[in-house]
Amino acid sequence: MRAPLCLLLLVAHAVDMLPLNRRKKQVGTGPGGNCTGCVICSEENGCSTCQQRLFLFIRREGIRQYGKCVHDCPPGYYGIRGQEVNRCKKCGATCESCFSQDFCIQCKRRFYLYKGKCLPTCPPGTTAQQSTRECQEKSPGEKKGRREQRPRKDRKPDRKLPARPRRPQA
């Protein structure tokens, strides 16, 4: 009678421990990170839901993806807040870092930053700053072809109008 009772207690203990093992697997650390800041996390895929103020950053490695909750999105990504989840989204193809999908802060090599856009060349009226990879507006003295800078030969000099005679005061 004692052997079946011991066996029954052993099975009951094993069944009781099963949810702990599953819970441990859900909250455990995954490859390359941990579940800090996660609401829902798994060993296989990391975080899938983050605490309210954090962003979900999903890193892809081949066909696998792994989620991590972060305060700030990494370079090349920007944070977008949503009703259900805050996510890190990838910047445009020419941006090294960005504020939003449409506003770059720093461009990748071979591109110049101008008013939040990354361009292959600087637009007319600007000059490329090689050190910062930005397009700077030229000062009026630098701009070529401005009519105010040099008088034209075919123009007559401005004539001054004669002063109006004053009315005598009575």
Image (cartoon, rainbow, N blue to C red):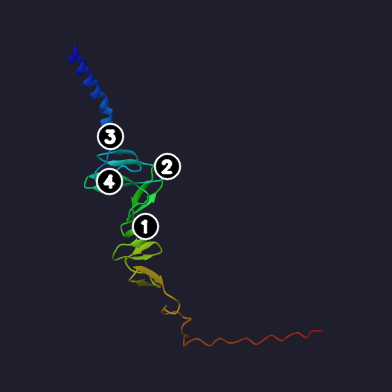
Q: What residue appears at the point 23 percent right and 19 percent down from the top-left corner? A: 9
Q: Earlier in the sequence, mark 2 or mark 3?
A: 3
Q: Residue furthest top?
A: 1
Which one is nearer the viewer's eye here, 164 or 52?
52
Left or right: where 141 falls relative to 6? right
Q: Position of residue 21 (x, y in %)?
A: 25, 31
Q: What residue appears at the point 40 percent right and 41 percent down from the top-left corner? A: 84
Frontmost of labels 2 and 4 is 4
Q: 10 Å neighbourhood of mark 4: few (<14), some, or many (≥20)?
A: some
Q: Earlier in the sequence, mark 1 or mark 4?
A: 4
The quadrant holding residue 164 is bottom right
Image disc number at residue 157 = none
Q: Which residue is mark 2?
A: 83
Frontmost of labels 2 and 3 is 3
Frontmost of labels 1 and 4 is 4
Circles 4, 3 touching at the beta carbon (< 8 Å): no
- Cα separation, mark 2 vs mark 1, equals 22 Å
- Cα separation, mark 2 vs mark 4, equals 26 Å
Q: Amino acid at mark 4?
A: Gly
Classify the position of the N terminus by image quarter: top left
- SS for tag 3? helix
Circles 2, 4 touching at the beta carbon (< 8 Å): no
Q: Amino acid at mark 1?
A: Cys
Image disc number at residue 24 = 3
Image disc number at residue 98 = 1
Q: Which residue is mark 4?
A: 33
Q: 10 Å neighbourhood of mark 1: few (<14), some, or many (≥20)?
A: many
Q: Amino acid at mark 3?
A: Lys
